[in-house]
Amino acid sequence: DAGVIQSPRHEVTEMGQEVTLRCKPISGHDYLFWYRQTMMRGLELLIYFNNNVPIDDSGMPEDRFSAKMPNASFSTLKIQPSEPRDSAVYFCASSRPGQGRTEAFFGQGTRLTVV
Amino acid sequence: AQSVTQLGSHVSVSEGALVLLRCNYSSSVPPYLFWYVQYPNQGLQLLLKYTSAATLVKGINGFEAEFKKSETSFHLTKPSAHMSDAAEYFCAVTEYSSASKIIFGSGTRLSIRP
């Protein structure tokens, strides 16, 4: 399997623009997580899905952030409008719990810079 | 709610020396515990995990960790550090009873001195 695939790897955008980050989880995984990593806050869980349904979005910082999972093989994280403080590395991860397999597998991340 | 605390945001050891990275957890139910490693500009990679079987867990690259319920700890060790071990290390916890969210500690940056 190719692992969790995120795109783009790098994104530079101007303040106020809409940004969409994409994630393809590992085939067969039924949990998908979005994390944000910054120097100040470390790794924060933003939202996670089970079988394409959002389970917990309490980590989503503001209404400017939204996430969708239209099918088992694709998810998006959208920021509209973007602000400089949104600059961070955004990771997507997936897992398939069961029989002790609870670990999450991470993508390479998207480094977002909002100027 | 579960949480993890990593003591020491930065640890520096000499090549060949013992590596000890500390992690304490809080969980109201039996936990699953993990250590992940992150190399520069990379995603997180699983080093090892505890899933209620053996309390001493061996992982990749010579690392191991011991689950101590009485101390609520899951410290990561390696007998002899190698230059290639320089990276950021994260301890994480999730609930045993359900495959819910995985919560990460703040991370410890490991530096290796020649």
Image (cartoon, helix red, strand yellow):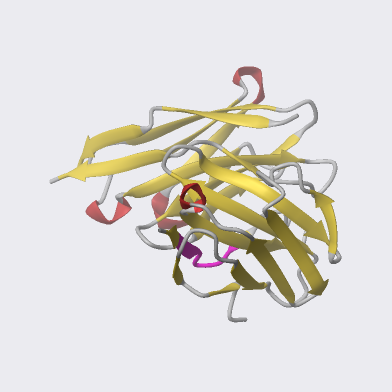
Residue A3, percent from left and from top: 59, 75
Q: Is residue B78 visible?
A: no
Residue A80 position by quadrant = bottom right
Residue at the front extreme? A16
Q: At 61% from the left edge and 48% from the top edge, which residue is drawn?
A: B49
Q: Is residue A48 left or right of residue A18?
A: right
Task: Judge left or right: residue B98 versus residue A109.
Answer: right
Asked if residue B61 is positioned above or below residue B19 in the image, the reply reads below
Image coords of residue B67 (percent x, y): 60, 32
Question: For residue B89: magenta?
Answer: no
- Above or below for B28 versus A78: above
Viewer-proximal residue among B71 and A113: A113
- Which region is colored magenta? A106-112
Relative to residue A47, is residue A22 drawn left or right? Answer: left
Q: Please identify the quarter of the rendering in which residue A53 is found.
A: bottom right
Q: Quadrant of the C terminus of chain A?
A: bottom left
The answer to whether residue B3 is visible is yes
Q: Position of residue A77 (x, y in %)?
A: 66, 63
Judging depth in this view, the residue of A8 and B19 nearest the camera is A8
Q: How many marks?
A: 0
In what quadrant of the picture does the N terminus of chain A appear?
A: bottom right
Give the answer, above or below, for where B26 lies relative to B17.
Answer: above
Residue B18, how many percent across, how many down? 30, 36
In front here: B54 or B43? Answer: B43
